[in-house]
Image: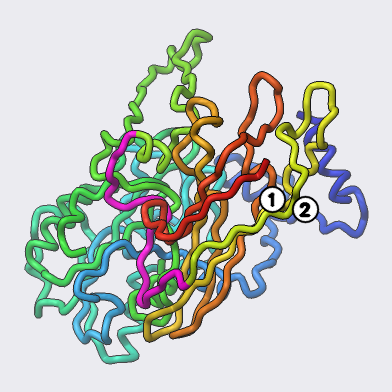
Amino acid sequence: MVRRILTKYYLLGQDDDSFPSLDPSTLSVIAAQYQQSLEDLVTNPPARDVRGEHAKHIRETGAAGAVLLKNVNNTLPLPAPINIGVFGNDAGNLTDGLIYQDPPATNVGFEYGTLDIGGGSSSVRHAYLVTPLDAIKERAKGIGARVQYILNNERLAAGDFHSIYPVPEVCIVFLKRFAAEGFDRVSFEADWNSTAVITQIANIYNNTVVVTHSVGINTMPWASHRNTGNSLADVLLGDVNPSGRLPYTIPVTEAYYDIPITNLTSDEVTSPDAWQFDFTEGLMIDYRHFDAMGIHPLYEFGFGLSYTTFELASNLSVKTLTDNMTALARANNGSSVPLSELFIPVANATIQVSNTGDRSGATVVQLYMSMPADFAPSGTPARVLRGFSKIELGAGETREVTFKLSRRDFSYWDTAAQTWRVPAGKFRLEVGFSSRNLPKSAEVTIL
């Protein structure tokens, strides 16, 4: 452990006097987090301000990462409504301080306040926090709109809306799903009675938009109904085209993931014979599992809608870059190519992408690879993501996207030879906009 830490210390030149010193508030921050008294050791110095233009970058990145899953009747972007309803305990200000503290007994995090970050080591002490409700109210001022809100999920789940009048033109519901190191989630559903909240709101108000802040996969049992901060307001009101894509698959029901919840007592956790997980799923995780089992997801890996439209404007072209490829990256006797050459491009895959809509926007073009079925080992996924490219296009614009594929991309781990092997046969490459939307394909032989 010491060797691993000190190797990076010297590699990065942290022993040099020119390297920035430790933030003077570090010890005080750690002490406050763990509720320890430092007495006279330090005087609670302020943190070093390294923010620069962080607020601008956070706003842009947050908007760019928003994933639009459903947009019935083109509800979004909102066309300057004058009466907006905001609902849910994820919409407003935190009531217990600007940092997550101890894990609650319920494992669902703090009740009131927008969830912009997970707990544990990923948490930070905010200088300030712009909540969705703050941002929507600020934007509403500019158009003279009314903003009505209820942030109590218990009241919402009971169907108590008597304080809301007149009826909002659009209702925006904010849900959250918390997690932190030290304890695990026990369900896929969003927290704080989320399904009842959505059901009650959607049954009363036809024009409903649901926004989730989540640390991971959520089920959406309410998805049969129609459908942080400044970043969300930018997307909801159409300033920014949503271009985020799902980094996981959303199932119709949590049983489709088949991940059991294991509940251990403290005695079992500390026992040397405690429950162990052998990773019997192999490579079949997320979309690979859904492909292998023939399961239709609610929303697939890589999925995301836009306010404009895109299409692939050409066939997929593949060009190999080497004629003397060997099967093994390096045999036991070291006679083949060195491992450093694993990541040198050996093929290029090229396709044209067009924005066929009437406004500019970004999309994410994705490339998946299927290994030769007759030569790949048992347990090889039907297809694996081998590249993606986010591309910004103006209305009517067409551009070319090229994926550089390395030897590693065409390889599997040969357990007998203990190295990476490129199998014989034809590889199938597919390109599209999600793991289940791959309209263009081509085949290529590397060996």
The residue under label 1 is: 26
Q: How many callouts does the rendering have?
A: 2
Q: Is residue 128 magenta?
A: no
SS of the residue under disc 2: loop
Q: Which numbered tag is attached to residue 281?
A: none
Please identify the quarter of the rendering in which residue 149 is found.
bottom left
The reply to whether the C-beta atoms of the residues labelled 1 and 2 are less than 8 Å apart is yes
Relative depth, front residue between 273 and 142? 273
Task: Return the mark for residue 22.
Answer: 2
Check disc 1 and report its element: helix, strand or loop: helix
Q: Is the magenta stretch mostly helix, strand or loop?
A: loop
Residue placed most toward the observer, 64 or 245 = 245
Please provide percent x and percent y for residue 377: 54, 27
Residue 391 makes an appearance in the image: yes
Q: x, y (%) of residue 435?
A: 41, 51
Q: Residue at x 32, y 64 (%)?
A: 91
Q: What residue type is labelled 2?
A: Leu
Name the residue at 28% across, 76% down.
76
What is the quadrant of the N terminus in the image?
Answer: top right
Q: Is residue 207 above or below residue 383?
A: below
- In percent of width and height, residue 394 lies at 48, 84
Instruction: Give the residue drawn at x 35%, y 83%.
Output: 139
- Binning the other alpha carbons within 10 Å of mark 1 as few (below 14), some (14 to 19) or many (20 upward) gives some
**Outermost residue toward the right?**
17
Residue 334 lies, in percent from the top left, at: 84, 27
Q: Going by the image, does 242 lie left or right of 218?
A: right
Magenta-highlighted residues: 293-313
